[in-house]
Image (spheres, rainbow, N blue to C red):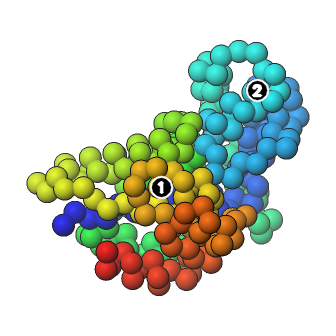
Amino acid sequence: MNPKIILFDIDNTLLYTGGAGTLSMKRTFFDLFGIDDGFVGMDFSGLTDSAIFREAMTNNSIEGDFTDLFPRFKTAYRQHLPVLLPEFRTEGSGKIMPGVKELLDSIWQRPEFLLGLATGNIREGAALKLDFYSLSHYFRDGGFGDDAEERSEVVAIAIERLANLLNASSTDDGKSEVYVIGDTPRDVQAAKANDAIAVGVATGRYSEEELRADGADLTLPDLSCSEPLLRRLQTD
Ligand SMILES: [Mg+2]
């Protein structure tokens, strides 16, 4: 049987930057357009970075072509993030979420699982955050916020990349079962759009009840309570 593909969201699922990510976005927007808070009133939960940037461009009536401006946004953002990540951890707000390392340590080297990312972060932003919190080594590849603006497409790309890794090392071309683990209704909806099993973790702004109402197959208060997930991973 093919290994199961397990895709993790980053922000509020694996870690919380303490606000370093949001402030990096704001400073980047200021660098590009001289606008102090380009994201006022916006809720980033579950949105891709590219979708956030496009919405902010619209909200602030920015003239110009998204496809020209988004690369400039990425260049500036990756300057700010490495400066701000340590500042917010020192303040005590940036952290790895409860149970994350224990869960990842228990599954990442098992041949029946393949771990990846399905995140709204651009690839470089994801790498900076995961490197900073020493979590990068668990994940083989993923889908990112500069692959697509729609989260369901990000998940589809992640599945394709992980499946390609499997196909390169296996003669079994059967489909893998896919799990998507995230903290927002958008993670859940993106999982369902790809026929994946949606695991909702209530470490962001949404409760288990809300995530279940959006269609999560399984919910957890946080990843330190991952026994039901491990049971399901082993029995399905
Ligand atoms: Mg999240």
Residue lying farthest to the right in this orientation: 36
**Residue at the spot 86% in from the left edge and 29% down from the top edge:** 35
Q: Which residue is drawn at 51% across and 36% down?
A: 148
Query: x, y (%) of residue 115?
Result: 39, 61
Nearest-to-viewer mark from 1 and 2: 1
Residue type pointed to by label 2: Thr
**Horizontally, is 218 left or right of 64 in the view?**
left
Q: What element carries label 2?
A: helix
Q: What element carries label 1?
A: helix
Q: Distance between the residues labelled 1 and 2?
A: 28 Å
In this view, the residue in front, 123 or 152, is 152
**Mark 1–mark 2 contact, CB under 8 Å?**
no
Residue 25, labelled with which disc? none
Which amino acid lies under the numbered mark 1 shown in the image of this protein? Ala
- Residue highlighted by disc 2: 58
Q: Is residue 180 visible from the viewing direction of this image?
A: yes
Dot 1 alpha-carbon crowd within 10 angstroms: few under 14, some 14 to 19, many 20 or more: many
Per the image, the residue denoted by label 1 is 191
